[in-house]
Image (cartoon, rainbow, N blue to C red):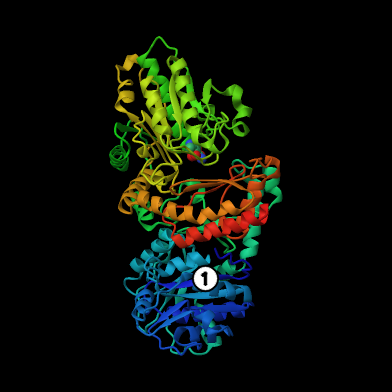
């Protein structure tokens, strides 16, 4: 994406509680005040409407702002869009057959920012004036990374409108510096109650600007406004430009934070990217650099960042209650969601146990299946689990035990319960030495053999259906899943499907199990369940499993497991809306079609000398890098080839995380074809650059 870099200035975004409250006059005055304070000041009116403009010349509010600030920048930067109809930006543009491109506005802002110390940007209309079909005026402020000044008025109705605007601004993720009350008409107003305002909002009332006839002279206007309001919070907000903020966050991160799966010694030496906001597939750091999110923020974001409907559902729930315990109580969204999950998951899974991340979803499944046999076969013996080699199911102790990635798990092996591992159907490098075509069959045969030999010892078999993602996007050959699940059933061993990474549409069906009509006894879900907004998880169980836990109080058949935030209402609300949107938008269908498109774009990677294998299922793809194509010789992990590729991709504006020598592409299913193509292009060039052509 456009890494904008080089941004120097900080800015403020001036918006109003409505049109016609004198926003432009205040914006112009603030620009003049900022300039007088010693900042080289730029101004911007990204979109203005109701103004006839001559191409290349500043007109209307934009011309006024430029005059007030003394800015010499051209119209293409100060006012990229100008329309004659007095309508909202979106509608005025539409009337002229134009659609506003926020990237044009951001690019102009970046240029102004590089050339100035401070920028005053005046929004069009109020904060919720539409700019495109999806973006409102206030969204532009977030995209530019700017705090907001709200221009209000002191007349009747002001409290309501000001609070509405503050609520909307904060819901959009904006910092509100303060509110300027402008007596825009020469009429009396009631005594303001700033104490109440401050108590209700925690936001500064900066003052009331008295009515003024003469607004043409910059110096006089600036003096008039400066006398009426407290400008210090505004100047303070401008005093820490992008680079300084970056440094401050980087230093404090390095001083206090410990990052997961990260060698902190290297981290403490390297640059730190600090994400501040996101929209759709874009993540933005505090210096304004933008990145394409090529890994759905670790495989969880579904509808893009800032999806408005899920956001609203969470905010609405927050307005009711954020959290009450599920121990001894139920709650409204948890019940609605439980019913929905039972409806969409494969036949038979109609009971949900909530938790808050993928590891706990698996931990619950492991303990649940273990305890199940204590009730069903009290004489014991079911003390082991069967899992696949190189599997990953999470980082809690039970979840680690069923994991087979030595690098992560060997340190803890002595802590972990006994687990048998069957070879994973990694057909590019078959662990049994088979050819690609016969690997799946032989590996499934091994699972069958283990089950035939030792079913009476196994509480459950656990696997990721269809794609072993953390293992390196290992895609299973067709039929493998159904065969293994069928064998577990035949041998009366519980089958746990870990759908934490693959669930909710990404493989082209709602659940990976749906591809081969597999009905698991227990299914683990997390990541995409909340659309990628909140930590949330669910473990589904069949009634066969659930019923085994029913008994008299003294029988001690209770499932003694639970977490404080189990069934958290905010998570439930996010999940419920996310699932509704997945269904309405046919996310599984989109993932299937876009996956095929991505597959076409990845095909040419085979020409690269160090691409050994390309694996994909729906929108989950992995590119395995090798030192030798013919020999499949692996790069030693110390060479950090995957890490280097991802670092270079990031420099080019694409965020992905390596799994050893495998580079996964795991985009949100709402990615457009253009975005997918861009990701593929960046990755192709990056791999070629890092490993050679
Ligand atoms: N299972 C699978 C298949 C996963 O991919 C992951 C996370 N990558 C987990 C479990 C663990 O999830 P979490 O990181 O939320 O604990």
| Residue 146 seen in the figure | no
- Residue 479 lies left or right of residue 351; in this view the side is right
Give percent across and percent down for residue 153: 39, 75
Give percent across and percent down for residue 586: 33, 52
Give percent across and percent down for residue 130: 37, 70
Q: Disc 1, ligand 1: is the CB inside 8 Å?
A: no
| Quarter occupied by residue 686 | bottom right
Q: Regarding mark 1 in the picture, which secondary structure is present there?
A: helix
Residue at (32% x, 32% y) in the render: 349
Residue at (41% x, 54% y) in the render: 303
The vertical placement of 204 against 508, above or below, is below
- Residue 171 lies left or right of residue 146; in this view the side is left
Residue, disc 1: 106
Q: Quadrant of the C terminus?
A: bottom right
- Residue 85 lies left or right of residue 248; in this view the side is left
Q: Quadrant of the N terminus?
A: bottom right
């Amino acid at each position: 994406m456009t890494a904008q870099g080089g941004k120097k200035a900080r800015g403020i975004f001036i918006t109003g509680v409505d049109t016609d409250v004198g926003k432009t006059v205040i914006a112009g005055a603030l620009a003049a005040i900022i300039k007088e304070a010693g900042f080289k000041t730029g101004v911007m009116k990204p979109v203005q409407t109701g103004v006839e403009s001559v191409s290349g010349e500043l007109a209307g509010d934009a011309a006024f702002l430029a005059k007030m600030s003394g800015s010499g920048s051209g119209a293409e930067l100060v006012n990229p869009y100008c329309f004659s109809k007095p309508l909202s930006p979106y509608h005025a543009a539409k009337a002229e057959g134009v659609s506003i491109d926020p990237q044009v506005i951001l690019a102009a802002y970046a240029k102004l920012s590089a050339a100035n110390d401070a920028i005053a940007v005046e929004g069009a209309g109020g904060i919720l004036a539409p700019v495109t079909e999806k973006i409102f005026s206030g969204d532009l402020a977030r995209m530019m990374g700017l705090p907001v000044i709200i221009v209000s008025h002191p007349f009747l109705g002001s409290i309501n409108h000001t609070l509405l605007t503050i609520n909307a601004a904060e819901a959009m993720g904006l910092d509100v510096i303060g509110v300027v009350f402008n007596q825009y008409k020469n009429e009396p107003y009631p005594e303001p109650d700033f104490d109440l305002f401050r108590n209700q909002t925690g936001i500064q009332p900066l003052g009331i600007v008295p009515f003024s006839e003469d607004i043409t002279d910059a110096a006089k206007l600036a003096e008039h406004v400066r006398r009426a309001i407290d400008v210090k919070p505004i100047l303070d907000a401008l005093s820490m430009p992008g680079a300084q903020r970056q440094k401050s966050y980087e230093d404090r991160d390095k001083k206090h934070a410990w990052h997961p799966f990260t060698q902190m010694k290297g981290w403490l030496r390297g640059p730190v990217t600090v994400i501040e906001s996101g929209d759709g597939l874009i993540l933005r750091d505090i210096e304004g650099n933008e990145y394409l999110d090529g890994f759905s923020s670790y495989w969880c974001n579904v509808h893009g960042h800032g999806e408005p409907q899920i956001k609203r559902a969470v905010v609405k729930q927050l307005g009711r209650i954020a959290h009450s315990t599920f121990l001894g109580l139920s709650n409204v969204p948890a019940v609605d969601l439980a019913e929905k999950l039972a409806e969409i998951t494969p036949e038979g899974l109609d009971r949900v146990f909530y938790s808050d991340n993928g590891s706990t979803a698996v931990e619950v499944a492991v303990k649940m299946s273990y305890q199940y046999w204590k009730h069903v076969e009290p004489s014991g013996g079911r003390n082991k689990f069967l899992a696949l080699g190189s599997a990953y199911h999470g980082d809690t102790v039970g979840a680690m035990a069923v994991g087979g990635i030595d690098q992560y798990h060997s340190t803890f092996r002595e802590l972990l319960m006994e687990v048998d591992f069957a070879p994973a159907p990694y057909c590019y490098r078959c662990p049994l030495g088979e050819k690609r075509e016969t690997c799946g069959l032989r590996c499934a045969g091994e699972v069958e053999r283990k089950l035939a030999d030792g079913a009476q010892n196994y509480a459950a078999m656990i696997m990721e259906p269809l794609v072993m993602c953390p293992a390196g996007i290992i895609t299973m050959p067709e039929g493998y899943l159904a065969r293994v699940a069928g064998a577990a059933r035949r041998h009366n061993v519980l089958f746990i499907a870990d759908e934490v990474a693959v669930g909710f549409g990404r493989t082209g069906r709602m659940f990976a199990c749906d591809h081969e009509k597999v009905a698991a006894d227990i299914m683990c879900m997390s990541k995409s369940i909340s659309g990628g907004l909140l930590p949330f998880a669910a473990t589904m169980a069949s009634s066969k499993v659930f019923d085994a836990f029913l008994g008299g109080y003294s029988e001690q058949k209770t499932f003694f497991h639970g977490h404080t935030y189990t069934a958290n209402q905010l998570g439930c609300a996010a999940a419920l809306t996310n699932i509704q949107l997945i269904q309405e938008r046919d996310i599984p269908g989109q993932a299937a079609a876009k996956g095929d498109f991505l597959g076409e774009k990845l095909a040419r990677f085979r020409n690269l000398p160090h691409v050994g294998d390309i694996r994909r299922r729906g929108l989950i793809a992995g590119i395995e890098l090798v030192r030798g194509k013919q020999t499949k010789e692996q790069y030693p992990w110390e060479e950090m080839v995957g890490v280097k590729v991802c670092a270079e991709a990031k420099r080019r504006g694409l965020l992905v995380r390596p799994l050893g020598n495998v580079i996964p592409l795991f985009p949100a299913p709402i990615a457009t074809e253009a975005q997918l193509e861009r990701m593929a292009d960046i990755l192709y060039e990056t791999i070629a650059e890092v490993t050679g052509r």
